């Protein structure tokens, strides 16, 4: 029965329905799609809190796995967009964000991961929080980079117009993109540094190696922009490469263990 269902699963189902509703086409002046998107985001937040054990005294830790981390990343991107849209309207991304939210909730529903303690040391909880936050910041940067590349491509093809633009001048959009890159880089640096402080938790495995390679890629991007003036597609390619490496570091590794090998990580 619905009334006896797991509250987390019920919340996930409602969030999924709200995201799907926000996907529906609507005139720009209609407010209900954004209201549905906000409702979905709030329900998504409650599901994440329940999954983290915030409402379950028997579960002390975080719900870890490729899908829960991906779900939290998408939620953070939506949170950043919600704050940003108060100052810089970006109406053309609503359906893309709703689709990403729906897929993230559905994946986390199908692959819930497991609740695990993260307190290997006094630094471990902060290491995890900062690592997840960096995922969200780089996710926001990728969203802006896609908009930047799309607008640049339309401008080059002379097909840009009021209806197809992302709502921002290219220079401002580029600045926003790399503000998120810089913020994500600072947070990722702190996360890696705190990880190194916990010798028992830090191992030079695939996850650690890919994380460091992602960090080095973002560092090269920032240095290249400052010293070599990298812009446009040259810069966004580095952003995409670093984001893929960072995504593979945890999400990719856990996907292999959980879905392909079907066993806990070594």
Image (cartoon, rainbow, N blue to C red):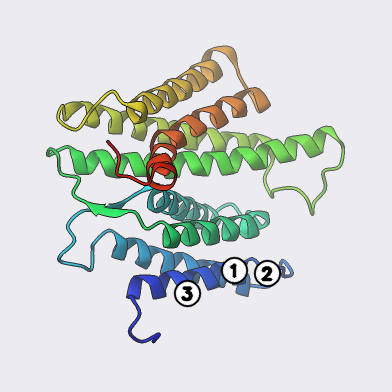
Q: Which of 185 and 44 lies nearest the eye of the viewer?
A: 44
**256 sits to left or right of 22:** left
* First reached walking from the N terminus: tag 2 or tag 3: 3
For marks 2 and 3, give the CA distance.
16 Å
**Residue 129: quadrant of the picture:** top left
- Compared to 196, does 266 lie above or below? below
- How many residues crowd around disc 2 within 10 Å: few (fewer than 14), some, or many (20 or more)? few
Dot 1 lies on which element? helix
Residue at image position (20%, 45%) is 118
Mark 2–mark 1 CB contact (< 8 Å): yes
Report the disc number at residue 24: 2
Binning the other alpha carbons within 10 Å of mark 1 as few (below 14), some (14 to 19) or many (20 upward) gives: many
Q: Which residue is mark 1?
A: 20
Q: Residue furthest top?
A: 227
Q: Is residue 198 above or below residue 226?
A: below
Q: Position of residue 81 (x, y in %)?
A: 52, 53
- Which quarter shows the N terminus? bottom left
Marked residue nearer the N-terminal end (1 or 3): 3
| Residue that mark 3 sits on | 14
């Amino acid at each position: 029965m619905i009334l006896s269902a797991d509250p987390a699963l019920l919340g996930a189902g409602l969030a999924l329905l709200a995201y799907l509703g926000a996907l529906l086409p609507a005139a720009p002046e209609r407010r209900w799609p954004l209201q549905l998107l906000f409702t979905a985001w709030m329900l998504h937040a409650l599901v994440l809190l329940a999954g983290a054990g915030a409402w379950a005294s028997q579960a002390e830790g975080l719900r870890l796995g490729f899908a829960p981390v991906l779900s939290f990343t998408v939620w953070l991107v939506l949170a950043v967009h919600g704050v940003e849209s108060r100052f810089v309207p970006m109406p053309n991304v609503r359906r893309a964000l709703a689709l990403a939210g729906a897929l993230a909730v559905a994946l986390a529903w199908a692959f819930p991961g497991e609740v695990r303690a993260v307190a290997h040391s006094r630094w471990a909880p902060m290491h995890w929080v900062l690592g997840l936050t960096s995922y969200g910041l780089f996710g926001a940067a990728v969203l802006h980079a896609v908009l930047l590349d799309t607008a640049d491509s339309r401008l080059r093809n002379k097909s840009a117009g009021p209806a197809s633009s992302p709502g921002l001048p290219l220079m401002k959009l580029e600045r926003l993109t790399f503000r998120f890159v810089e913020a994500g880089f600072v947070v990722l640096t702190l996360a890696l540094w705190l990880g190194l402080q916990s010798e028992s938790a830090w191992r030079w495995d695939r996850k650690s190696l890919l994380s460091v390679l992602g960090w080095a890629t973002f560092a090269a991007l920032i240095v290249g922009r400052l010293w070599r003036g990298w812009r446009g597609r040259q810069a966004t390619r580095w952003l995409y490469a670093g984001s893929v490496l960072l995504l593979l570091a945890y999400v990719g590794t856990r996907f292999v263990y959980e879905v392909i090998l079907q066993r806990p990580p070594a």
